[in-house]
C-alpha cells in the first residue's frame, strides 16, 4: 500500500497525539522519532508521523530539521503532507510555526496552506481567528506564563503575521458552517488575493470534519491533531484507504515508572494526585547544576521499589519555583539539565527491567526516547484524549505513554497502567 499521509510534528507528545487521531480514524500509523535514517525500512503503514524536538529550537534549526523530515517523506512517496504543532500554538514572535510552514510550503511548491490548532475535546477552539482554552482567550490562560513559549496574544492572524513572510488570511465560522464547498470556495478566493497562509475557525468536531473534507486537495495542511480528524475519510472516499483495518499490538509486561518534567497546571495536579498513594522522588535542578549525580540517586532510590506499582520521578514544580530556577541557571540551561538527567534515569530504569513508562512533557518525552534509542512507535489504546499507549519498534519492546503537559485528567498517571 502507498504512503498516503506524511506528517512532521514539532514535538514527541504532539506527534503521538496526531498518530492516535489517525489510528482512531482508520489509518494504520507509525510514529518515527527524529529525522529517519535514509536506510530505515519504510514501515507498512498508511500514515507516518515523524516526531521532531524542534518546538523550542532556534527557528533556522527547526526549519532545517523539518525540511530533512519532509525530504524523507517525499522520497518515500507520501501523497499529502501535514505539519503538526501544539493546540495552544506554542511559539514565539520569531517562530517556529511560521518559518517552518513557509519552508515546507516552498519545498512542496504549493500556493497555500491552512492553520488550525483547534481540539474541542480538550477545550481548544478557534473563533474569529482567536484561540480559546476553555472559556478563556489563550492570552488569559495558563499559557501566558509558559516557561518556554509564553503566549500573550490570542489572535492567530497576528501571531502568524509576526512569524511569516507571507500574507495571512482567515476563514471564519460563518463560512465553515455552510460546509466544505463553501470553505473550498473561500480558500480559492483568498489565494487569488495573494494570501498563502490561512487561519481556519473551528469550535466543534463537526467543523473539523468539514475542514478536513475541504482540504482534501491541498498538498500541505498544518494544525493540531484535531485538524487531521477528517483527512482519513478523504482517502476512503478516493478508494485509496480500506476502512476498518487495524494494527496488531504487542503485550508488554515488566516494571512501571512515571517520569514527569512538565510544569503545566495539569501535570502539577497529576503529580499531586500520585503523591498521595505512590513512592515519589523529586529532582533538584540546583543540585544537578552543582555537579551532584542526581540521576544515580534517583535510580538507586527506585530500584528496590520497582514492580507493577509505578514509582514517580519528577521535576514538576509551580510557576514561581520554575521561574526562580530559571533566573539562577538560565531558561535553556535549566531545561537541558533536567532533560539530560531524565534521559540517564530512563536508560538505567530500562536496564533494570522497567518496560512500561509514562512520560509527561514534550521536551522530557523527546529527551527520554532519544536516550533510549527508540526509532519508532506503534500506536495503541487511548488513555485520555490525545494520549495513547505506544509500543516501541525493536527490542526490548517498551510500552510508552508520551503525555503533553496540558493533557490528561488529574488521575492520569495512576489510571494509565490500568489501560494496559
Image (cartoon, grey):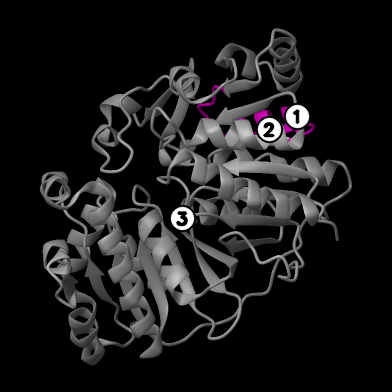
For this view, does 50 lie left or right of residue 307?
right
Disc 1 to disc 2, C-alpha distance: 6 Å
Residue tagged 3: 13
Q: Nearer the viewer, residue 392 or 204?
A: 392
Sequence order check, earlier mark of 1 and 2: 2
Sequence order check, earlier mark of 3 and 2: 3
For this view, does 99 lie left or right of residue 372?
right
**Which residue is situated farthest in the right direction here?**
239
Relative image position of residue 416 (x, y in whole percent) = 39, 67
Badge 3 density bin: few <14, some 14–19, many ≥20, Cα 10 Å: many
Residue 217 in the image: above or below residue 336: above
Disc 3 to disc 1, C-alpha distance: 28 Å
Residue 353 in the image: above or below residue 81: below
Badge 2 density bin: few <14, some 14–19, many ≥20, Cα 10 Å: many
Disc 3 to disc 2, C-alpha distance: 24 Å
* Quadrant hosting residue 193: top right
Relative image position of residue 305 (x, y in whole percent) = 23, 87
Residue tagged 1: 110
Q: Secondary structure at mark 3?
A: helix
Q: Is residue 215 magenta?
A: yes
Magenta residues (range): 200-219
Q: Which residue is found at the position 18% from the left and 75% from the top?
A: 294
Q: Quadrant of the N terminus?
A: bottom right
Q: Are marks 3 and 1 in contact (CB under 8 Å)?
A: no
Q: Is residue 44 magenta?
A: no
Q: Nearer the viewer, residue 20 or 144?
A: 144
Q: Secondary structure at mark 2?
A: helix
Q: Which residue is found at the position 75% from the left and 36% from the top?
A: 108
Relative image position of residue 268 (x, y in whole percent) = 21, 54
Residue tagged 2: 105
Residue 420 visible, this orientation: no
Residue 65 in the image: above or below residue 122: below
Amino acid at each position: 500500500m502507498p504512503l498516503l499521509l506524511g506528517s512532521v510534528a514539532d514535538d514527541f507528545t504532539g506527534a503521538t497525539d496526531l498518530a492516535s487521531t489517525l489510528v482512531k480514524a482508520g489509518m494504520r500509523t507509525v510514529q518515527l522519532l527524529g529525522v529517519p535514517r535514509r536506510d530505515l525500512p519504510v514501515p507498512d503503514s498508511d500514515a507516518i508521523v515523524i516526531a521532531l524536538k524542534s518546538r523550542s529550537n532556534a527557528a533556522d534549526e527547526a526549519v532545517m530539521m523539518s525540511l530533512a523530515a519532509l525530504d524523507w517523506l517525499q522520497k518515500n512517496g507520501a501523497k499529502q503532507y501535514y505539519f503538526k504543532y501544539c493546540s495552544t500554538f506554542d511559539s514565539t514572535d520569531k517562530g517556529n510555526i511560521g518559518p517552518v510552514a513557509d519552508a515546507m510550503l516552498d519545498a512542496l511548491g504549493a500556493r497555500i496552506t491552512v492553520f488550525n490548532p483547534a481540539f474541542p475535546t480538550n477545550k481548544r477552539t478557534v473563533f474569529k481567528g482567536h484561540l480559546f482554552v476553555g472559556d478563556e482567550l489563550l492570552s488569559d490562560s495558563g499559557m501566558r506564563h509558559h516557561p518556554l513559549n509564553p503566549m500573550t496574544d490570542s489572535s492567530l492572524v497576528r501571531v502568524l503575521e509576526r512569524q511569516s513572510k507571507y500574507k495571512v488570511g482567515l476563514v471564519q465560522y460563518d463560512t465553515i458552517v455552510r460546509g466544505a464547498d463553501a470553505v473550498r470556495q473561500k480558500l480559492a478566493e483568498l489565494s487569488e488575493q495573494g494570501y498563502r497562509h490561512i487561519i481556519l475557525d473551528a469550535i466543534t468536531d463537526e467543523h473539523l470534519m468539514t475542514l478536513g473534507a475541504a482540504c482534501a486537495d491541498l498538498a500541505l495542511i498544518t494544525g493540531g491533531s484535531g485538524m487531521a480528524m477528517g483527512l482519513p475519510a478523504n482517502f476512503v472516499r478516493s478508494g485509496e484507504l480500506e476502512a476498518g483495518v487495524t494494527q496488531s499490538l504487542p503485550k508488554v509486561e515488566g516494571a512501571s515508572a512515571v517520569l514527569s518534567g512538565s510544569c503545566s497546571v495539569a501535570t502539577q495536579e497529576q503529580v499531586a494526585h500520585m503523591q498521595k498513594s505512590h513512592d515519589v522522588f523529586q529532582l533538584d535542578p540546583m543540585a544537578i547544576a552543582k555537579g551532584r549525580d542526581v540521576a544515580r540517586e534517583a535510580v538507586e532510590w527506585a530500584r528496590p521499589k520497582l514492580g507493577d506499582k509505578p514509582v514517580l520521578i519528577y521535576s514538576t514544580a509551580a510557576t514561581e519555583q520554575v521561574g526562580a530556577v530559571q533566573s539562577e541557571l538560565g531558561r535553556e540551561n535549566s531545561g537541558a539539565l533536567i532533560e539530560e538527567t531524565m534521559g540517564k534515569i530512563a536508560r538505567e530504569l530500562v536496564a533494570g527491567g522497567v518496560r512500561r513508562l509514562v512520560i509527561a512533557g514534550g521536551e522530557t518525552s523527546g529527551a527520554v526516547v532519544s536516550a533510549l534509542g527508540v526509532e519508532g512507535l506503534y500506536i495503541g489504546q487511548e488513555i485520555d484524549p490525545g494520549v495513547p499507549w505506544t509500543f516501541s519498534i525493536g527490542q526490548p519492546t517498551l510500552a510508552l505513554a508520551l503525555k503533553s503537559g496540558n493533557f490528561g485528567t488529574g488521575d492520569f498517571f495512576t489510571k494509565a497502567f490500568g489501560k494496559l
